[in-house]
Image: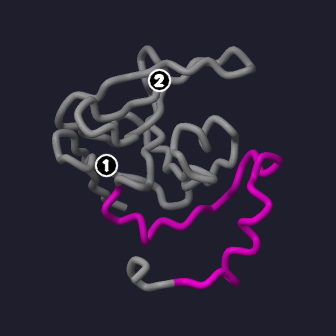
Amino acid sequence: MPITGQCHCGQFSFRALADPERVVACHCSDCQKFSGAPFRTVIAVPAENVKFTGRAKHYVKVADSGNRRAQGFCANCGTQLYACEPENATVFNLRLGCINERAQLPPKVQIWTCSAMPWLQELPAVPAHEKGLK
């Protein structure tokens, strides 16, 4: 499936050919902190299937396992863009929030559910407003 995306300010954009079966919702505490949300959703795309325009800034995170992951974000607006290996990236985990076609990419699996917020199950019962609060 062809996808496109960009950061909030537009200084960084991308085009990719992605497999919709590779969408993952991660509930780990690192993803919660990085995204500022209860979970983060990504789609894994082979590096040869992604074309970036602009330059991302990187922060290298070291996991408890010792694995290193480069977190790509826009240096201007701070939009989280992707994660990849710090050197010689073979796969980019593109952040669903900056993908234009995100409504067509539901998660196929959830990981680190041991860290999931317990109230997520109750969210459908919470009052909802189509637009902001009035």
Q: Secondary structure at mark 2?
A: strand
**Residue 77 x, y percent position in the rendering:** 27, 39
**Which quarter of the rendering shows the N terminus?**
bottom left
Task: Tell me if residue 129 comes above or below residue 59 in the rendering.
Answer: below
Q: Residue at x 35, y 65 (%)?
A: 101
Q: Is residue 43 left or right of residue 32?
A: left
Residue 94 or 132: which is nearer the viewer?
132
Residue 76 or 92: which is nearer the viewer?
76
* Residue of label 1: 16
**Residue 41 x, y percent position in the rendering:** 54, 53
Q: Secondary structure at mark 1?
A: strand
Q: Residues within 10 Å of mark 2 (few under 14, many from 20)?
A: some
Q: Is residue 40 left or right of residue 134?
A: right
Task: Tell me if residue 90 comes above or below residue 62 in the rendering.
Answer: below
Residue 28 colored in magenta in the image: no
Q: Is residue 30 left or right of residue 78?
A: right
Task: Tell me if residue 47 comes above or below residue 63 in the rendering.
Answer: below
Which amino acid does the dot numbered 1 rest on? Ala
Which of pointers 2 and 1 indicates the residue nearer the eye? 2
Quick one: which residue is furthest to the right in this view? 114
Residue span colored magenta: 99-128
**Residue 63 x, y percent position in the rendering:** 67, 22
**Residue 49 x, y percent position in the rendering:** 34, 42
* Residue of label 2: 70
Q: Residue at x 43, y 71 (%)?
A: 104
* Colour style of the rendered protein structure: one colour
Residue 27 or 109: which is nearer the viewer?
27
Q: Residue at x 61, y 52 (%)?
A: 39
Q: Residue at x 55, y 55 (%)?
A: 23
Q: Residues within 10 Å of mark 1 (few under 14, many from 20)?
A: many
Task: Tell me if residue 24 comes above or below residue 35 in the rendering.
Answer: below
Q: CA distance from mark 2 to mark 1?
A: 19 Å
